Image (cartoon, helix red, strand yellow):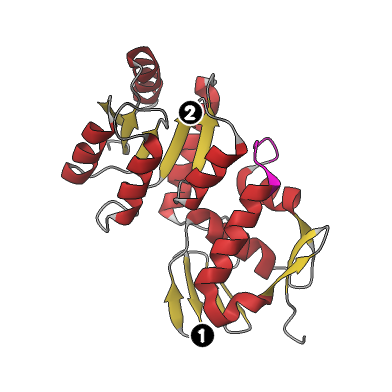
C-alpha cells in the first residue's frame, strides 16, 4: 500500500533533493516545488497529505503560501511543516498563527525531519493512544479525541492540531496549573525548541474560537494556564 503524498517546497535544489531522498527512502511519495507559485498550483491541482514548506522563497514567500493554503477550503486541512533557516521568535509565531503544525530549522538532521513528518501524519489519522478516553466532557465542552472534534455549547469548533492538543491537555486535568514548558512538552516533546510566546498564541486562538466557553481557560499570572474545575 503506497504511503502518504508529500509536497516539498524548497528553492535550493540540493536541499530539495536531500529532503526528497530521505522521504522516498521511507516510502513516501514526494512532489517538489521550487517556488511559492508552483507550490500553490500543485497544492490545488493534486491531493497531498502534507506540505513541507520553506519560508524563504522567491516571489511568493513561504508565509504567504501558508496563508493561501490555509485560506482555501480545499487545501486548509493539509498539515504544514515549516522548514526554514529563520529561527527567530517572530517567524515561528507567525507560522503557527497561520496554522502551521510544526517547524524544523536549518541546518537540520534528516532523522529529526523524518521523525517530525511521522508525528504529524500520525496526528492526522486522529487515532487516540491506547488507554486514553475517547470522549471527554466538562462544563459545556465535549472533546472527542478519536474524531479530533470539539463541541462548545452545542457548536462544533474548528481547531488546529496544536489548539486541540492544548485544550485537551488542560481540560483532562481541571484545576491543575500547567507551565508553558509543560504544555510544550506534552504537545511536542521535551526537545522541541519553542518559546513561551508561541504557547500564548495558541491560548489566544483557543479563547477566540471557544466563545462563551473561553473563560474556562484561566491564566495563572507568572506561572502558566489552568482549566477551571466544574464546581467553580
Q: Residue furthest left?
A: 45
On-image quarter of the C terminus: bottom right
Q: Residue furthest top?
A: 14
| Residues at marks 2 and 1, CA–CA distance in whole angstroms | 39 Å
Occupied quadrant, residue 172:
bottom right
Residue plotted at (32% across, 39% down) = 4
Residue nearest the observer in this picture, 229 or 204: 204
Q: Which residues are magenta?
A: 190-196
Residue nearest the observer in this picture, 132 or 45: 45
Q: Which residue is mark 1?
A: 153
Q: Which residue is mark 2?
A: 84
Occupied quadrant, residue 227:
bottom right
Residue plotted at (39% across, 17% down) = 15
Q: Relative to residue 74, is residue 225 drawn left or right?
A: right
Question: Relative to 210, does residue 124 appear above or below in the rendering?
Answer: above
On-image quarter of the N terminus: top left
Q: How busy is the neighbourhood of tag 2: few (under 14 within 10 Å), some, or many (20 plus)?
A: many
**Residue 219: percent from the left, percent from the top?**
74, 67
Magenta region, main secondary structure? loop
Residue plotted at (19% across, 42% down) = 46
Amino acid at each position: 500500500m503506497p504511503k502518504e503524498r508529500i509536497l516539498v517546497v524548497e528553492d535550493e535544489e540540493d536541499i530539495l533533493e536531500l529532503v526528497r531522498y530521505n522521504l522516498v527512502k521511507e516510502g513516501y511519495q514526494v512532489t517538489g516545488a521550487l517556488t511559492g507559485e508552483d507550490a500553490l498550483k500543485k497544492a490545488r491541482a493534486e491531493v497531498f497529505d502534507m506540505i513541507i514548506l520553506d519560508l524563504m522563497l522567491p516571489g511568493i514567500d513561504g508565509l504567504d503560501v501558508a496563508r493561501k493554503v490555509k485560506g482555501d477550503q480545499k487545501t486548509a486541512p493539509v498539515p504544514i511543516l515549516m522548514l526554514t533557516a529563520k529561527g527567530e521568535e517572530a517567524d515561528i509565531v507567525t507560522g503557527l498563527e497561520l496554522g502551521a503544525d510544526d517547524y524544523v530549522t536549518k541546518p537540520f538532521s534528516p532523522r529529526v525531519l523524518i521523525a517530525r513528518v511521522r508525528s504529524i501524519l500520525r496526528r492526522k489519522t486522529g487515532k487516540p493512544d491506547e488507554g486514553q478516553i475517547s470522549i471527554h466532557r466538562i462544563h459545556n465542552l465535549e472533546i472527542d479525541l478519536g474524531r479530533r472534534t470539539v463541541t462548545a455549547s452545542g457548536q462544533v469548533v474548528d481547531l488546529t492540531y496544536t489548539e486541540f492538543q492544548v485544550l485537551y491537555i488542560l481540560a483532562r486535568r481541571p484545576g491543575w496549573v500547567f507551565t508553558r514548558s509543560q504544555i510544550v512538552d506534552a504537545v511536542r516533546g521535551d526537545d522541541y525548541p519553542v518559546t513561551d510566546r508561541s504557547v500564548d498564541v495558541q491560548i489566544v486562538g483557543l479563547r477566540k474560537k471557544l466563545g462563551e466557553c473561553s473563560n474556562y481557560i484561566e491564566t495563572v499570572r507568572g506561572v502558566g494556564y489552568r482549566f477551571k474545575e466544574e464546581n467553580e
